[in-house]
Amino acid sequence: MSTATDARNRTRIDVSSEVPMVTITREFDAPVQRVFRAYVEPELFRQWIGPRDRTFELDVFECRTGGAWRYRTGLDNGSQARFFGSFHEVRPDERIVQTFTFEGFPDSVALETAIFEDLGGDRCRVTSTSLVDSFEARDAFVASGMESGVVEGYQKLDELLVVLGHPSD
């Protein structure tokens, strides 16, 4: 599956048939340092993660090797979904390796790796993989509506990157 967000930058979502993994690839019109900053600074991360119609609250966000994270998001029915994990490796402007767990399914932990690639010309690519323990868990992840959340989140990130690029910031 692949979703176009505009003619220049597309969010590509690939579902592997060989391993229970999803790969998300997206290019940004910003230098890798600015994109990485938006991933690791709590206040910036909170502004772009997830779909536009959801509230998003960080309870813990220690984006460093050995750090932890926990967040919650509002749902249509007024309840909240909670997620948590740990950062296994944070290498500035290069890579983030973390676990991802939905509290509703605590036995299904994803191992996620985000690779940041400088494309030159103040552009970069982020390739994220999410590996889970079964094809059933992967398929539930894909069926959860994650595609629209990822696409909208990256659109919000595009908007934030423009603001971060202004000299006054």
Image (spheres, helix red, strand yellow):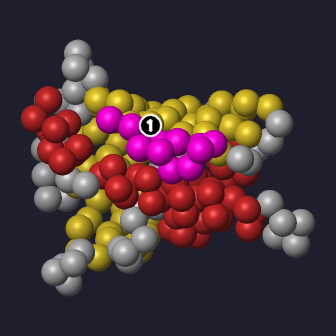
Residue 26 is left or right of residue 73, and the answer is right
Residue 72 at x, y percent in the picture: 32, 69
Q: Which amino acid does label 1 sit on?
A: Arg
Q: Farthest front residue?
A: 7
The quarter holding residue 133 reads: top left
Q: Nearer the viewer, residue 107 or 66?
A: 107
Q: Can residue 144 be seen in this view?
A: yes
Which secondary structure, mark 1? strand
Q: What stretch is highlighted in magenta?
A: 1-11
Q: Is residue 23 magenta?
A: no
Q: Farthest left residue?
A: 136
Residue depicted at x 62% and y 57%: 158
Residue 115 is left or right of residue 132, and the answer is right
The quarter holding residue 125 reads: top right
Q: Mark 1 points at which residue?
A: 12
Residue 53 is left or right of residue 132, and the answer is right
Residue depicted at x 35% and y 56%: 148
Residue depicted at x 58% and y 59%: 157
Q: Is residue 33 visible?
A: no
Q: Farthest top residue?
A: 18
Q: In this view, does 131 lie above or below 44?
A: above
Residue 99 at x, y percent in the picture: 35, 42
Location of the N terminus (image quadrant): top left
Q: Is residue 53 above or below residue 101?
A: below
